[in-house]
Amino acid sequence: MAEQSPLEIGIVGGGIAGLSAAIAMKRAGHNVEVFERTGFVNEVGITLTVAPNAGKVYDGWGFDLKTVGAVDAFQIRHLDGLTAKTVWHEYFNDVQERYGGGVSCLRHGDLHTGLLEHLNATEGHPVKLSLQTDITEIDCEKGIMRTQDRSKMEKDVLVLANGLGCRFLNLITGKECPLIDTNLSFFRFLVPAKAVDDDPNIRPLFENQDDELCFFQNFAAGTSIVTYLCEGRQSRVINVFAKRPPGKGAKADRSARVDRADLLEMTKDFHPSIKAMLQKAPEEGIFSYPLLVRDPLTNYVNGKAVVIGDAAHVMKPQQGQGASIAIESTGCLEILFAGIGKEDVQPRLKLFEELRLRRCGPVHVFSNMPLDSDGYSWMVEKIKPFWDAGKPLPPPGSKPVSAPFRDFIFSYNVREESKKALAEHRKHEEKQQQQQQQQQQPPEDIHLNGNQVTNGEHVTNGNHVTNGNHVTNCDHVTNSNHATN
């Protein structure tokens, strides 16, 4: 069989999802072009976690997160924000063995830089990076994109990985999919780890603790803090999750900043040791990210276009899966699109959608589940389109990232599941092809008692029937005549 010509792949968005998709499609043997409307910006305050379900994808690519400063968390602690007393504590001692990877904490910019380097080092056709290029229009059916200067490009596959503000989402879903502003924000900053460890007022919070995800919560105020180490344990990221002060950022405003005084006001009722940690924040210029949500989508594909990452599923950070589910999807793309030609694009996109809806849908719902008394009933209702009714859900009262959620989320191996689904898909295609061939072939000759039936002609006891005529113990009859004895 002749080798397939590579597909032309256009990826809109050059973030974590977009660069991971570029590596996936390059590994799959295709020509890739990435369109990013800005230059690559290395924002120091943005951090993320990569869970085992995503780490298995990067491991398969030979991309070691430790080389970009990732720190694995070996436990999770929840402390009461008012008293600094531990209210819940679980070790991750079995995570590596049980799920095939760790929970890695790292800076967004470090991961982005590492992905760019890995993209260049990956074998395959060179990838074109078109920076400062804003895609303003797409035609899903034809695979056509237009830029701000009206330049036109045609691709075999369009991968939309341009974040939660994706302007083309209605072209995928056929309806408006509005972002919902929760009026909450994440306020993020980094401090040197040594500055925290050396402060006697803060040290008791972390002394003699393994590397971890640590939460301080004040449910009455609706405020929480999550902190962990990154940059090879050199830095500690601190994320304050609280109601947004007036005038400090609005829906989809990624440029807003707050001051240290704002953070201290949000956390004024917290324990003194926690407030001492927040005193390490910069006096001003602290990143403010509005927390937006969107109902789960019921389709990710239209024509030649597919949506992945935050563009497809905007998640709250409580399960730590925003980046990980996006990375998972790129692992699926690699397996399904490896070495295929244009005639396979539509069935493979359909298969991608089937696989990812039943995977991303539940994780999306688990991540956005309210943490109040009505949260579980909300989750049970929202998850119905994506969940097998015969399969048990995590029990009521399960905390985010606790074992019931980890068993579903962390254990998934997207590469293996995609390979299994692809094998079944190929079996189904082969069966369909066999059936079509059988329908197209003329009936074979059949022999009865030494007599022959050919193309509908029947011979009995040496007599001959032609064109549907019947002869029994008599001469030859044609043209619908009937003879007996």
Image (cartoon, rainbow, N blue to C red):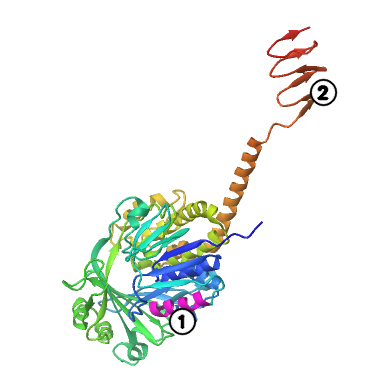
Is 233 on the left-hand or right-hand side of 96?
Answer: left
Foreground residue, 138 or 290?
138
Residue identifier under label 1 = 68
Q: Name the residue under label 2.
A: 449
Percent coordinates x, y for residue 69 in the rendering: 45, 83
Q: Measured along the vertical axis of the image, is residue 441 above or below residue 152?
A: above
Q: In the rendering, at what x and y percent does residue 310 appear?
A: 36, 64
Q: Of the residues shown, which amino acid type is indicated by label 1? A: Val
Give the foreground label among 2 and 1: 2
Q: Position of residue 168 (x, y in %)?
A: 34, 58
Residue name at image x 63 percent, y 35 percent = 439
Q: Does the magenta stretch include residue 270?
A: no
Q: Tell me how many marks there are.
A: 2
Quadrant of the rendered image containing residue 399: bottom left
Q: Which quarter of the figure has residue 248? A: bottom left
Region rendered in magenta: 106-120
The first of marks 2 and 1 along the sequence is 1
Extreme top residue here? 485
| Alpha carbon distance from label 2 to label 1 | 79 Å
**Residue 263 vertical placement versus 399 (above, below):** below
Residue 411 showing in the rendered view: no
